[in-house]
Amino acid sequence: MAALRAPSTQASPYGRILWRHPHSSLLRMKFIVLIAWCLFASFMSHASDFSDKLKTREYVLLMRHTLAPGIGDPPGYSLEDCKTQRNLNEEGQKQAVTIGHWLRKQGVQNAAVRSSTWCRCKDTAALLKFDGYKIEPSLGSFFDQMSNAKEATHQLQKFISANLRTKGNKALILVTHHVNILDFIGENIASGDMVLTQVDTQGKMVSYKLIPRPE
């Protein structure tokens, strides 16, 4: 007769007990659904916070135009002729479309989009695919005349202050250039990056959060 083996005194891990339960498939499914719901709730909370802030009169979204290879513009360029300017390449165009999709996923459904006069900004603004865009002169680049930075930023602050009071619950999205954003918040950002900026009643920056360009 085979010798009887003493029962093990080692407790089974709880995980093993769970999966050996007669209804383990159902429990496993409920567990997966619970985890998925928690992740979704966390994402929606973040998205809601982002979009809710942009509905208020305290926040504006500054955005550098997407990829336009090079620095500055060619000599003799004209703001009336896009072919004479530095423009978005194919990658830059795709980046702008991706950013528009990303913004809507964050809950930004309605937006007042404003753009610099430069074609690379206008093209970026158009490819976000909200309800069109309008030109705002205070978003124009002063790269060729850096001595104009202080006055340009002052005009931008006045524009932001006035428009936050009248935009309703739309997000105010401003597509501009790196020099403009640098002077406004004090930090260089890359093409397609965004800055969620809290401002005071005068349109001056109070705080900001850098949002790298979504892939």
Image: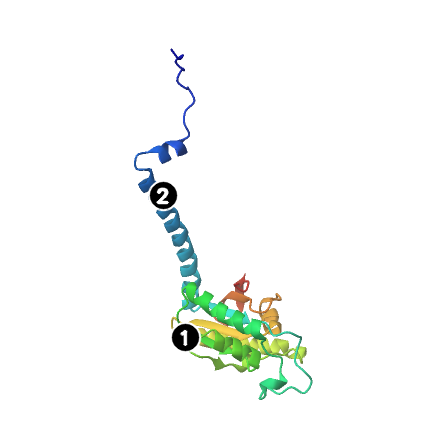
Q: Which residue is mark 1?
A: 167
Residue in front for this viewpoint, 192 or 138: 192
The spot of residue 136 in percent (x, y) is 51, 81
Question: What's under tag 1, amino acid-wise?
Answer: Lys
Label 2 and label 1: CA atoms lie apart by 44 Å
Q: Residue furthest right?
A: 75
Q: Secondary structure at mark 2?
A: helix
Question: What's under tag 2, amino acid-wise?
Answer: Phe
Q: In the image, what residue occupies the spot 46% across and 65% down?
A: 102
Residue 194 can be seen, yes or no: yes
Residue 65 can be seen, yes or no: no
The spot of residue 134 in percent (x, y) is 47, 81
Marks 1 and 2: in contact by CB < 8 Å? Answer: no
The spot of residue 27 in percent (x, y) is 33, 40
Q: Which residue is mark 2?
A: 31
The spot of residue 184 in percent (x, y) is 58, 70
* Number of the front mark, 2 or 1: 2
Q: Is residue 27 above or below residue 185?
A: above
Question: Dot 2 surroundings within 10 Å: few (below 14), some, or many (20 or more)?
Answer: few
Say which label, 2 or 1, has the lower sequence index. 2
